[in-house]
Amino acid sequence: PPSPQANQAEEAKRQQAKAEQVKRQQAEAERKSAELAKQKAEAEREARELATRQKAEQERSSAELARRHEKEREAAELSAKQKVEAEREAQALAVRRKAEAEEAKRQAAELARRHEKEREAAELSAKQRVGEEERRQTAQSQPQRRKRRAAPQDYMAASQDRPKRRGHRSVQQNNVEIAQAQAELVRRQQEERKAAELLAKQRAEAEREAQALAARRKAEAEEAKRQAAELAHRQEAERKAAELSANQKAAAEAQALAARQQKALARQQEEARKAAELAVKQKAETERKTAELAKQRAAAEAAKRQQEARQTAELARRQEAERQAAELSAKQKAETDREAAESAKRKAEEEEHRQAAQSQPQRRKRRAAPQDYMAASQNRPKRRGRRSTLPAPPSP
């Protein structure tokens, strides 16, 4: 039989398993409550978004309605302005036509007066010509010794205007001239009558055009008013249709929101189940990855140690190369110093030889100086020697 210690251990294991189960149940309940709170917050957020969209839609509809009313007002103002402008133009046209008719009437009266004066002048001239002709014939029938009376001024002017003819004018010729003057007068009267008829016709045409323009303007104003009323009616119908569409859209969105919430709840439950399965898989995957990571860490440590060993060997090799380079540099420096000392010594010897050569008599042939000595002699300043044998320049 099992010992009491084993029974206690089994009981402790069962108690621990129950405690773990209770903890899991509490965690599951907390998770579900958190999901429900999240769903509730999501539903509230969607409801707020829906209310915001509906409010924005209403504001947009109101703004659109205000714009339409503004357009209607502007159209009405434009129609009224056009109507006033048309009336003003019609009045101006009527005034202008009336002034033209009065001017034509005045011109016709002036023309009639001028024609009447011309007719009277022609009749007077014809009468004067007839009287003059009669007087001339009477004077011709009298003796030649009688002096001729002076002709009147009008007759003299008329005689100057017409061409001179031989002989005397007969009564028949005077009658022909009188008939021509009367025919001219009749023709002028006919022309005046035609001008008056044309003026009356133009005046009637102007009045008819003014009436037609006024009728057309009135019809246009009535048409604009009818169109404005039709536009207002259509806009009212559109507004009602928009409100109905907005209400239907809101109801459809509410139904869609409820359906989405149900789908979201089912989806969340499915996701919770999948999350539990995924947690188990992730735990196993985590353990596997932990083992692989441990292997990779061990391999990385080994590689790191190898890399450190290689770096140490590379550092030692580099230090050895640097040491050899330092030794070579020291040797080169010593060789350079030695060569510099030898060069200095050689230059000193050359300087001594040069001084010794300068101390010898001048008649003795000078020995050829070495290359270094020649270079040194070129670089140093010239000493004063013997004076030149050339004659001195003349004094100023």
Image (cartoon, helix red, strand yellow):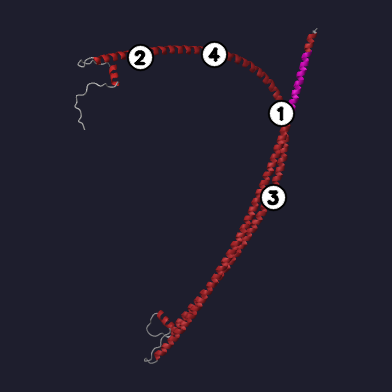
Up/down of 62 relative to 152, above or below: above
Pick the residue in front: 390 or 206: 390
Amino acid residing under circle 3: Glu
Q: Secondary structure at mark 1?
A: helix
Q: Position of residue 221 (x, y in %)?
A: 64, 58
Between discs 4 and 2, the one toward the N terminus = 4
Q: Residues within 10 Å of mark 1 (few under 14, many from 20)?
A: some
Q: Is residue 189 above or below residue 352?
A: below
The answer to whether residue 194 shows anywhere in this view is no
Asked if the residue under mark 3 is in contact with the one under mark 4, i.e. CB atoms within 8 Å, the reply is no
Residue 207, picture quadrant: bottom right
Q: Which mark is residue 236?
A: 3
Question: From what the image shows, is residue 262 above or below residue 58?
Answer: above
Which comes sooner in the sequence, label 3 or label 2?
3
Element type at mark 4: helix
Whole-Å distance between the Cαs marked 4 and 3?
A: 88 Å
- Asked if the residues shown at circle 1 and circle 3 are in contact, with their CB atoms under 8 angstroms apart, the answer is no
Label number found at residue 282: none
Residue located beneath label 4 in the image: 308
N-terminal of the pair, mark 2 or mark 1, is 1
Q: Which residues are magenta?
A: 11-35
Circle 2 residues within 10 Å: few <14, some 14–19, many ≥20: few
Left or right placement of residue 316 versus residue 228 in this view: left
Residue 18 position (above or below residue 95)? above
- Packing grade of label 3 (10 A; few <14, some 14-19, many >=20) is few
